[in-house]
Image (cartoon, rainbow, N blue to C red):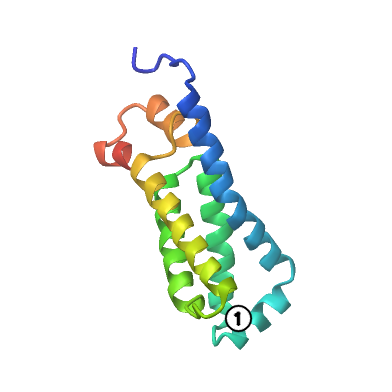
Amino acid sequence: MENAPSRLRLADLILLLGRLLLSLIFLHEGSTLASNIAATIDTFATLGLSAPVALAVIALQIGAGLSIAAGFLSRFGALALALFCLATASLFHTNFASQNELLHFEKDLAIAGGMFVLAASGAGSISIDNLLKRRVSGMPAWLRAVL
């Protein structure tokens, strides 16, 4: 009866809500950056970053944000965004004399922590990952573990 649907639990709904809330900031920021690409590239240039880096950041934020929201390869998306948040905190928010910079540093660390938890726990039962695990027969064990 492995393919039989199980009862929805409160924990499943809470995990879905957590995924959606974690992904929201990245989907919003990525789409905002993409909506005015010229200004985004100019802003990245003032930080000493190239246009390909700007495009990669947009792709990461939207792609991994969607991955987490949908629960599709969410462990990878969460790990990528956790590392992105750690890099952002350590590269751009280290002026602790500024209360605003300290707040952004702490926010990035907190989001990274949530992403690491999600990477360890997986997307939960309300996810494409779970649907694939239950529906695809003959899936290799390593792929089941990733999902």
Residue that badge 1 annotates: 44
- 105 relative to 34 in the view: left or right: left
Please identify the quadrant where the N terminus is shown.
Answer: top left
Can you name the residue that lies furthest to the left here? 141
Residue 31 location (% of width, % of height): 68, 60
Residue 25 location (% of width, % of height): 60, 55
Q: Is residue 77 visible?
A: yes
- Name which residue lies at 54% across and 83% down: 49
Residue 7 location (% of width, % of height): 46, 15
Which image quarter: residue 123?
top left
- Name which residue lies at 52% across and 42% down: 19
Q: Is residue 147 visible?
A: no
Residue 141 vs 104, above or below: the answer is: above
Q: How many marks?
A: 1
Residue 76 vs 96, above or below: the answer is: above
- Name which residue lies at 47% across and 64% down: 85
- Name which residue lies at 39% across and 40% down: 122
**Could you tell me the amino acid type at mark 1?**
Phe
**Dot 1 lies on which element?**
helix
Residue 13 vs 120, above or below: the answer is: above
* Mark 1 residue crowding within 10 angstroms, few (<14) / some (14–19) / many (20+): some
Which image quarter: residue 118?
top left
Q: Nearer the viewer, residue 25 or 61?
A: 25
Please identify the quadrant where the C terminus is shown.
Answer: top left
